[in-house]
Image (spheres, rainbow, N blue to C red):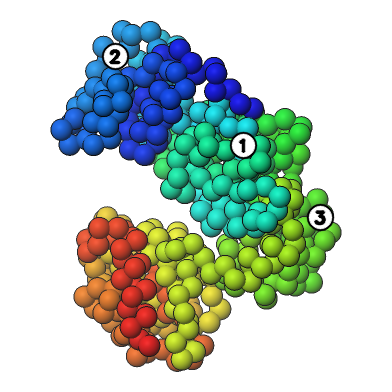
């Protein structure tokens, strides 16, 4: 529903810039709101603040002064990463001022239907797949949200001829009031962001807010194999569409006789899907359910699944060199992600792992690395990973300087049919500015093998 006119003459405080706050401030001003921006970064080092100031928007930088609330604001838009324990946010809540994230603005700015995707793992892959599956479907899919493109900015540019596919974080969903995706997807729940939410229960409830404003005309796509997810969707008002890799759920997506099925219809043979791993199959079932509800064709879905090799740095297939397959999972910056990555393969694995030492040990990996025949490790955590590799009975263990040097060493140990997997289980910051740069280094090194 298009409610742009409701923003006119509103008094709005935007707290925290980055991409979302910057976009929100510009959009609010564009649609007639009186905007004040507050950001912790000093004005002199803040190009976004300078640009907004040049547009005539009041900007206050360097602190979050409580005196800001002396002004009569209709609502606040905060950066999702700013916690609700921030004194300025606490004071605003105490005064009864609504506190939103920029995702809420999407409700005001678009006429397009929205497919919203949330969960602890797999959001980006699922969002990307749904967007690709909806191409050539009669409506133009626009992918946005936590995947990198600000949702409210996209929403302002769409019409009822478009369909928005949005990756949504728990941080973003805590700041909604009327945001209503026509199709809402909840993939799974694992321990994450508990430093922000406080408890796992609060974290789960934040995720479940994706269903808050849905009606019987909307759809809830959920993981039927996750007890916590099933519990969270019990009371939703929308039509429930389950997906399950272990049993048949006739009103949803499931596996039967080697085929992916949706509501009794064969979609694709599992063996024809390029993306590996059980967790990938869960994401695929969720994607198919949402895409079919949005009228994607079977031909388009099949074409995508036969060619999609993964989101970059997320269990991304790179290439096969003399029978050895190389996968880039540089986004695996924690143990859970690496557990899932190594579990995705039945073939022998040469694992490349290591990075920033955050003080934790890696014993939780031991039971998952039974098919790892070689460990090549690097970075600060190399000694810790070598210890658990020895305990797991891995016979070939080597420490190298970095990812670039790890690739040719891994290839020397590899035989046709093996998988060389970069899945570090650690952040990159001891050696690389980002996991993206680490992954790019891996990709470049693999291409050099040719």
> Which mark is nearer the camera, 3 or 1?
1
Q: Nearer the viewer, residue 167 or 304?
A: 304
> Which mark is nearer the camera, 2 or 3?
2
Mark 2 vs 3: CB contact within 8 A? no
Q: Secondary structure at mark 3?
A: loop
The answer for how far apart the CA atoms under marks 2 and 1 are is 36 Å
Q: Position of residue 200 (x, y in %)?
A: 49, 40
Tell which circle, 3 or 1, labels the residue nearer the N-terminal end. Answer: 1
Q: Left or right: where does residue 334 sit relative to residue 223?
A: left
> Which mark is nearer the camera, 2 or 1?
1
Determine the image quadrant of residue 133: bottom right
The answer for how far apart the CA atoms under marks 3 and 1 are is 30 Å
The answer for how far apart the CA atoms under marks 2 and 3 are is 54 Å
Which residue is denoted by mark 3 in the rendering? 263
What residue is shown at x 49% (from left), y 43% (from top)?
Answer: 145
The residue carrying pointer 2 sits among few (fewer than 14), some (14 to 19) or many (20 or more) residues within 10 Å by Cα, namely: some
Determine the image quadrant of residue 382: bottom left
What residue is shown at x 26% (from left), y 27% (from top)?
Answer: 54
The residue carrying pointer 3 sits among few (fewer than 14), some (14 to 19) or many (20 or more) residues within 10 Å by Cα, namely: some
Q: Left or right: where does residue 272 sit relative to residue 11?
A: right
Q: Can the viewer see residue 388?
A: no
Please tell me how many numbered marks the rendered image carries. 3
What residue is shown at x 31% (from left), y 26% (from top)?
Answer: 55
Q: Position of residue 162 (x, y in %)?
A: 63, 42
Q: Left or right: where does residue 77 sit relative to residue 133?
A: left
Which residue is denoted by mark 1 in the rendering? 159
166 is higher (above) or lower (below) than 83: below
Q: Can the viewer see residue 270?
A: yes
Which residue is denoted by mark 2 in the rendering? 68
Tell which circle, 2 or 3, labels the residue nearer the N-terminal end. Answer: 2
Q: Left or right: where does residue 234 sit relative to residue 61?
A: right
């Amino acid at each position: 529903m298009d409610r742009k006119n409701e923003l006119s003459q509103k008094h709005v405080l935007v707290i925290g810039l980055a991409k979302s706050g910057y976009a929100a401030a510009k959009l609010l001003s564009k649609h007639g709101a009186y905007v004040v921006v507050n950001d912790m970064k000093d004005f002199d080092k803040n190009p976004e603040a300078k640009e907004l100031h040049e547009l005539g928007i009041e900007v206050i930088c360097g602190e979050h002064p409580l005196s800001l609330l002396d002004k009569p604001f209709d609502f606040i838009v905060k950066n999702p990463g700013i916690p609700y324990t921030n004194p300025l946010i606490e004071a605003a809540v105490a005064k009864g001022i609504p506190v939103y994230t920029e995702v809420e603005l999407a409700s005001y700015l678009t006429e397009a239907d929205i497919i919203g995707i949330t969960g602890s793992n797999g959001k980006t892959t699922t969002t990307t797949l749904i967007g690709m599956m909806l191409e050539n479907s009669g409506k133009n899919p626009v992918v946005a949200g936590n995947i990198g493109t600000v949702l409210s900015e996209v929403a302002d540019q769409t019409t009822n001829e478009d369909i928005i596919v949005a990756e949504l974080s728990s941080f973003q969903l805590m700041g909604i009031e009327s945001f209503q995706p026509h199709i809402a997807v909840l993939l799974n729940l694992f321990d994450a962001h508990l430093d922000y939410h406080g408890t796992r229960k609060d974290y789960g409830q934040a995720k479940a807010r994706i269903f808050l404003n849905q009606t019987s005309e909307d759809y809830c796509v959920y993981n039927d194999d996750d007890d916590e997810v099933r519990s969270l969707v019990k009371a939703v008002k929308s039509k429930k569409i389950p997906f399950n890799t272990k049993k048949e759920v006739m009103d949803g997506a499931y596996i039967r006789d080697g085929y992916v099925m949706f509501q009794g219809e064969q979609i694709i043979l599992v063996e024809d899907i390029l993306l590996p791993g059980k967790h990938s199959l869960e994401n695929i079932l969720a994607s198919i359910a949402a895409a079919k509800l949005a009228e994607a064709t079977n031909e388009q879905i099949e074409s995508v699944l036969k060619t999609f090799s993964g989101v970059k740095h997320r269990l991304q297939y790179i290439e096969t060199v003399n029978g050895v397959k190389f996968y880039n999972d540089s986004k695996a910056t924690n143990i859970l992600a690496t557990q899932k990555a190594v579990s995705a393969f039945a073939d022998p694995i040469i694992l490349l792992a290591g990075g920033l030492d955050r003080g934790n040990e890696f014993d939780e990996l031991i039971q998952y690395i039974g098919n790892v025949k070689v460990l090549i490790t690097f970075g600060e955590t190399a000694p810790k990973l070598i210890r658990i590799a020895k305990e797991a009975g891995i016979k070939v263990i080597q420490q190298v300087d970095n990812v670039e040097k790890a690739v040719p060493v891994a290839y020397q140990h590899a035989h046709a049919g093996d998988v060389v997997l970069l899945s570090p289980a650690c952040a990159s910051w001891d050696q690389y500015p980002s996991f993206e740069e680490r992954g790019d280094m891996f990709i470049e090194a693999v291409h050099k093998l040719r």
